[in-house]
Image (spheres, helix red, strand yellow):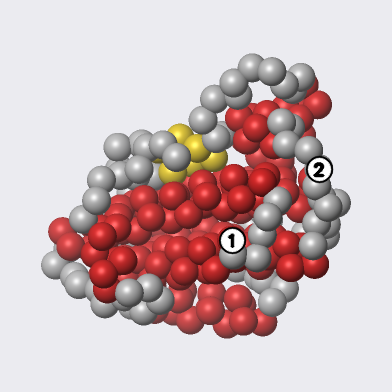
């Protein structure tokens, strides 16, 4: 089973940038967004931005939130990585690569606060939390059945992320965590748009499971978000 090599390489860049960053200059956008909506964290810009925040005390709820979001963002990567091996549309590979940077961004926060990584030593497709493991197994099984179902799974994961990130933000006041979560939320909306566009092109439809139809429609009908 393939190990999580991408996290190590991304976090090495983040660590190096944190050491090198002296602050003062605008670090540039934390997240880059292409024309399709694929939203990718810049490791160096994220590190420079995090270095501008004071290290505030962390509540137990915030610590739990970071562990939760680390697994949820990794789940997105791991499911899409499987779909990328099964189906031709580039949306799976593109967003899988992007989600690796989302998971690494949360790992950067875990490291910043010297918290244990719940995914340490685990290969792709393996999770510490049984609920995430069961969800991963179910979503991969569904994704294997057809291209339409795999695209629906993509929409489902991004919809789930939108609900969960929004809920997690309610218990957080540390500005650095909120900055990362706001970018994760923007990325999830963009990725939902991307998956939904391809699903529609393929003749598929989707009924929201985690957010209201009104919110879902407002996201899908609006333009790709290129900035905060």
Count of residue discs? 2
Query: Which quadrant would residue 1 be assigned to in this image?
Result: bottom right
- Residue 182: % across, % down: 52, 50
Q: Residues within 10 Å of mark 2 (few under 14, many from 20)?
A: few
Residue at (67%, 82%) from the top-left corner?
A: 130
Residue at (73%, 62%) from the top-left corner?
A: 62
Which numbered marker is on residue 55?
2
- Residue 83: % across, % down: 41, 63
- Residue 60: % across, % down: 80, 67
Q: Looking at the picture, does residue 131 appear above or below residue 217?
A: below
- Please report whichever mark, 1 or 2, sits nearer to the chain's N-terminal start: 2
Camera sees residue 149:
no
Residue at (61%, 50%) from the top-left corner?
A: 178
- Residue 121: % across, % down: 78, 61
Residue at (72%, 27%) from the top-left corner?
A: 17
Q: Secondary structure at mark 2?
A: loop
Q: Secondary structure at mark 1?
A: helix
Report the residue marked by disc 1: 169
């Amino acid at each position: 089973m393939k190990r999580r090599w991408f996290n190590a390489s991304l976090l090495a860049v983040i660590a190096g940038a944190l050491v090198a960053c002296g602050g003062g200059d605008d670090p540039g956008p934390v997240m880059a967004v292409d024309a399709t909506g694929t939203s990718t964290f810049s490791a160096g810009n994220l590190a420079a931005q995090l270095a501008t925040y004071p290290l505030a005390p962390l509540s137990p709820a915030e610590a739990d939130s970071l562990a939760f979001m680390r697994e949820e963002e990794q789940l997105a990567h791991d499911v899409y990585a499987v779909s990328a091996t099964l189906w031709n549309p580039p949306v799976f590979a593109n967003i899988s690569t992007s989600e690796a940077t989302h998971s690494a961004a949360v790992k950067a926060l875990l490291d910043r606060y010297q918290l244990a990584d719940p995914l340490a030593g685990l290969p792709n497709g393996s999770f510490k939390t049984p609920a995430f493991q069961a969800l991963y197994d179910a979503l991969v099984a569904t994704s294997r059945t057809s291209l339409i179902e795999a695209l629906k799974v993509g929409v489902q994961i991004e919809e789930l992320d939108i609900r969960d990130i929004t809920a997690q933000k309610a218990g957080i006041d540390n500005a650095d965590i909120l900055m990362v979560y706001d970018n994760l939320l923007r990325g999830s909306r963009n990725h939902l748009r991307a998956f939904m566009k391809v699903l529609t092109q393929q003749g598929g439809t989707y009924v929201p499971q985690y957010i209201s139809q009104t919110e879902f429609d407002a996201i899908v009908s609006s333009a790709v978000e290129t900035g905060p």
